[in-house]
Amino acid sequence: MTDSTPANDPLGAASADAARDIADVTAVELISTVSVHLLSAAALRCGLADEGEQHQDLDEARTLINALAGLITASAPDLGDTHARALRDGLRSVQLAFREASVIPDAPGEGPGEKYTGAVS
């Protein structure tokens, strides 16, 4: 039988540390952080990074933008106007970047995230 105390189980200790770290973070901060990660990844996949087209992948961008739009739309009432407005602005920016990068444009209201946000123009 093995001893599963934190000293003898480094993964268990790391997991306990991560749980403590997450417990110290507010829901608004966690949602904002995840949103910024999704936003950054979507911008990269839309070709907005310094390397531009090297990382562009519009299929991936569509998925990321849909997830971001759903998260922001669902959490906006709990985030408060200041946080939600900044995230919506970022979302709109990547939606427009996607539209600009796309060779075959989506119909209005059919672009990534638009089922959650409405048509973006």
Image (cartoon, helix red, strand yellow):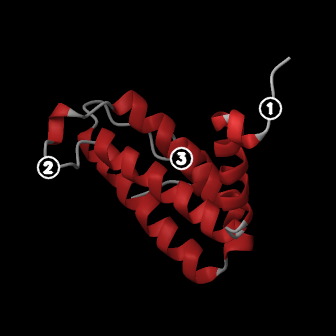
Can the viewer see residue 62 in this picture? yes
Name the image quarter holding residue 21: bottom right
> Is residue 99 visible to us here?
no
Horizontally, is 46 left or right of 2 in the view?
Answer: left
Q: CA distance from mark 2 to mark 1?
A: 47 Å
Mark seen at residue 50: 2
| Residue type, label 1 | Ser
Q: Residue beneath label 1, please? A: 4
Q: Secondary structure at mark 2?
A: loop
Amino acid marked by disc 2: Asp
Identify which residue is drawn at 48% across, 45% down.
Answer: 65
Give the left or right position of residue 5, taking residue 44 as reference. right
- Indicate which disc, 2 or 1, sits on the residue closer to the N terminus: 1
**Percent from the top left, x then y, of residue 114?**
54, 48
Of helix, strand and loop, which one carries label 3?
loop
In the rendered image of this protein, does residue 63 appear above or below residue 92?
above
Earlier-in-chain disc, 1 versus 3: 1
Determine crowd level at label 3: few under 14, some 14-19, many 20+ residues with C-alpha closer than 10 A: many
- Do callouts 1 and 3 mark residues in contact (Cβ within 8 Å)? no
Is residue 53 found left or right of 82 in the rendered image?
Answer: left
Q: Which residue is mark 3?
A: 113
| Tag in front: 2 or 3 | 2
**Residue 38: x percent and y percent?**
47, 49
Query: Which quadrant would residue 84 be assigned to in this image?
Result: bottom right
Query: Residue visible at 81% across and 29% down?
Result: 3
Residue closest to the eye, 19 or 49: 19
Camera-near label (2 vs 1) is: 1
Q: What residue is drawn where x is 67% and y is 53%?
A: 17
